[in-house]
Image (cartoon, grey):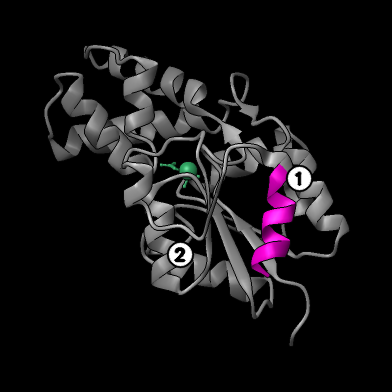
Amino acid sequence: MGGMIAAIFDLDGTLIDSAPDIHAACNAVLAEAGGRTLSLARMRDFIGDGAPALIRRAMAEAGLGRDDALHARLLAAFLDRYERAVDLTRPYAGALAALDRLARAGHPLGLCTNKPIAPTRAVLAHFCIADRFGAIVGGDSLPQRKPDPAPLRAAMRDLHADRCIFVGDSEVDAQTARAAGMPFALFTRGYLHAPLAETPHDAAFDDWTTLPGLIEALA
Ligand SMILES: O=C(O)COP(=O)(O)O
Ligand SMILES: [Mg+2]
């Protein structure tokens, strides 16, 4: 097809700082189950591999063990709170303006997140940005989630794009982009757990006002 390069974005730790809402919802569930609550910094360490992994890690840390039935119950309780948890979430400075700028320049935009689709839709509606995206793939939209390349490929297909860049904050995103054979721009102020030098990326940025220029340079 040719045409403008598409930009596909990660959500948590990339467009929005959602850790405070995830922290509050998770701690409420841990406390109800009689577990210890976790610090915000610790919770940030657990974000990136989707909700089931987050609850598994949080249970272990809270002293609640690794029982599968308890995990299923706490995951359901967490998801119930999570889809209404938007009040403590903030877009990163300049992120929404950068989306506007890229959309105005004609770039198709997509979203590929490990956040479950219900809280994804809730937070996009809260910030009135759902209609920016021609493709939205959540952590439970497909049988596979990142770092499997299938969700990223699905977003690319939905955008009818033949060239894409992926923009994310974590080693999971870097692996996903590499597996999909897609260039990767790393936002360095999100929830990266690995050292920057060990996280493969084609560009890195800490200021959203610079991203449209980076995309033009990579295109
Ligand atoms: O929910 C998660 O674990 C991470 O979500 P993300 O893929 O948008 O960073
Ligand atoms: Mg992320």
Q: Is residue 94 left or right of residue 64?
A: right
CA separation, marks 2 and 1?
A: 21 Å
The part of the image, by quadrant, that contains residue 200 is bottom left
The local secondary structure at tag 2 comes to helix
* Residue closest to the eye, 164 or 63: 164
Q: Main secondary structure of the magenta part?
A: helix
The residue wearing badge 2 is 177
Is residue 146 shown to the viewer in this render?
no
Q: Magenta stretch: residue 116 in it?
A: no
Mark 2, Cα crowd under 10 Å, few <14 / some 14-19 / many 20+, is many
The residue pinned by badge 1 equals 98
**Residue 50's spot in the image, x, y percent?**
38, 45
**145 sits to left or right of 184:** left
Q: Is residue 211 magenta?
A: yes
Q: Residue furthest right?
A: 104
List x then y, in percent, for residue 75: 33, 35
Label 2 with label 1: CB-CB less than 8 Å: no
Of the image marks 2 and 1, the number of the one nearer the N terminus: 1
Give the magenta-colored segment's residue range: 210-219
Residue at 78% across, 52% down: 131
Going by the image, does 195 lie left or right of 174?
A: left
Please give left or right for residue 37 compared with residue 136 in the image: left
Image coordinates for residue 144, horizontal then vertical, percent = 37, 63
What residue do we see at 77% from left, 73% from top?
4
